[in-house]
Amino acid sequence: MRILKFAALAVLLTPFAATAGSYPEKTITMICPYSAGGGGDTATRMIAKLAGDMMGVKINVENKTGGGATIGIGAVSKSKPDGYTLGFVSTSPITIRTHMMKAPYHPLNDLTYVGQFVASSQPLVVLKDSKFKTLADLISYAKANPGKLRWSTSVQRGGPHVAVEAMFKKEGAKATFIPFKGGSKVLAALLGGTIDAAMMSEGNKATLDGQTRILAEGTPNKNPVNGSVPTLTEAGYPIAPAIFFGLAGPAGLPADVLAKWDGVLAKVVKSPEFIALADKRKWSLDFAGHKAFTQTVISDYNAAKIAIADIGMK
């Protein structure tokens, strides 16, 4: 396993020969694997506009949906590795679903991770007046009352689902997962008392206007805004379901393309337009260049593989 991990890292981080001429010299295609109007599409189009203006080229966005985002990402993986076809990527179709389904790409072999621009927490929350004051309270109840604790998250078999099930498995506790389609229905269920806890995006949590209590942050590192709240990682649980947004290209992208995007994405994330979009969508901006983003993907992919096998999720 360690040999495979380091081999994958070496391949993903190996710079390839530079492109001829000065990149970019023509129109770039940016594939979004999600439908128009959603968060992924909105982020892709803003990146395309701002990056295109900075580089002096047109960047066209194409929506290629289906297969839980794997069709669009598969198209990126099969494109020519010249930097003129890139795509939006997020956590689930890269590090989670590929362990439970046959995707048209291997995340560690067929893609180059260009850069990350968002890393949002998925906090585990209860209502403000809940009897569960701490994460330990929640786990103790689940252990003492098998199956009675009801919880949910917006994406079944996604990162947050895997993370919480892995936590309960480690503690020998049993809870009941109640599936809903979308964060708004999870929110309504929590407010209405249908569920006792939820792992939700920062955006959904913020809409509650202080009606929730955060029991644990879903990021590896502490949220500076909620410094007293433990993270799942520091609490000793196997996986932190932080959600990343980033760009990827096919395997073998040239070194000059990666260097160019390192600089451009760093500027995009600091731009007033992107900051305003992030504030509106309640995203946490967190730029990581090619090397750091690649290491995040490998670490998350391997952690998810172990956790999914342990809980037997298919």
Image (tube, rainbow, N blue to C red):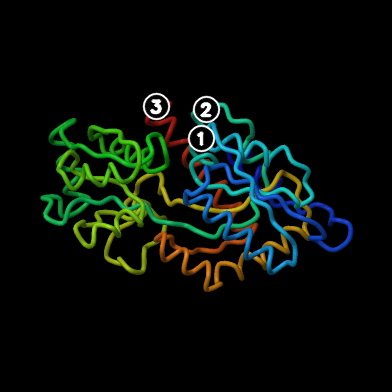
For the N terminus, the image quarter is top right
Residue found at x 59% / y 30%: 103
Which picture quadrant has residue 175?
top left
Residue found at x 32% / y 37%: 165
Q: Residues within 10 Å of mark 1 (few under 14, many from 20)?
A: some
Which picture quadrant has residue 54?
bottom right
Q: Is residue 86 above or below residue 170?
A: below
Q: Secondary structure at mark 1?
A: helix
Q: Tell me the kind of residue under disc 3.
A: Gly
Q: Residues within 10 Å of mark 2 (few under 14, many from 20)?
A: few
Q: Are marks 1 and 2 in contact (CB under 8 Å)?
A: yes
Residue found at x 62% / y 40%: 73
**Where residue 221 appears, x then y in whole percent?**
41, 60
Q: Secondary structure at mark 3?
A: loop
Q: Tell me the kind of residue under disc 1.
A: Gly
In screen coordinates, is 171 left or right of 21?
A: left
Q: Tell me the kind of residue under disc 2.
A: Met
Residue denoted by label 3: 312
Q: Observer-nearest residue: 46 or 126?
A: 46
Q: Secondary structure at mark 2?
A: loop
In the rendering, which numbered label is found on residue 68? Answer: 1
